[in-house]
Image (spheres, rainbow, N blue to C red):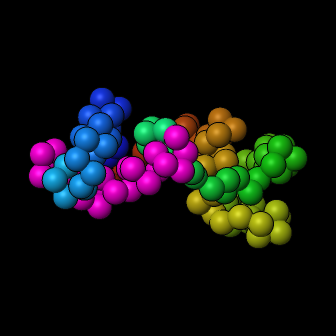
Amino acid sequence: MAFSMEFRVAVATAYQACGSSIEVAEDFPCCASWVRRLIQVQRETGSLEPKQPRRPNNNKLDDADLKLIAELIAAKPDIYLKELAEKLGNKVSVPTLWRACGKLGLPRKKSRCTPRSKTART
């Protein structure tokens, strides 16, 4: 959880007034190491704003792959995701293909017209 900007400014101001991260941590609900890190980030970047989380780009399927997936599913609607992965050269895993099908808006079930199972609830 990131602290609010008002809190960060108040902590930085208190640190500049006394110069001790331990004293500031006693006055505010935070730890001394966080105060030191906040001041270090302020020194390095000139800002007290929290860093934005960096998420890696794990998108291994490009537009051509998505188009190929749609074509393969249109040609054979009941293809298993494992078979689809093999046709793509095992470039991605089965769960990744499942998410790609959802992104393309393709149905995840073979048919909605299939009759329900005959087993009753217990």
Q: Residue at x 65, y 35 (%)?
A: 105
Quarter location, residue 58? bottom right
Looking at the rendered image, the quarter that the C terminus falls into is bottom left
**Is 16 or 115 nearer to us in this picture?**
16
**Is 5 or 84 nearer to us in this picture?**
5
Write down the region rendered in magenta.
Answer: 25-46
Q: Residue at x 67, y 53 (%)?
A: 57
Taking the magenta stretch, the answer to whether it contains residue 92 is no
Q: Give above or below for 75 relative to 113.
A: below
The location of residue 15, given as percent across then percent down, is 27, 46
Left or right: 26 with respect to 79? left
State the residue lying farthest toward the top. Answer: 6
**Label total for image:** 0
Q: Residue at x 39, y 50 (%)?
A: 39
Left or right: 104 with respect to 65? left
Taking the magenta stretch, the answer to whether it contains residue 35 is yes
Prevailing SS of the magenta stretch: helix
**Is 57 or 50 nearer to us in this picture?**
50
Q: Residue at x 82, y 64 (%)?
A: 87
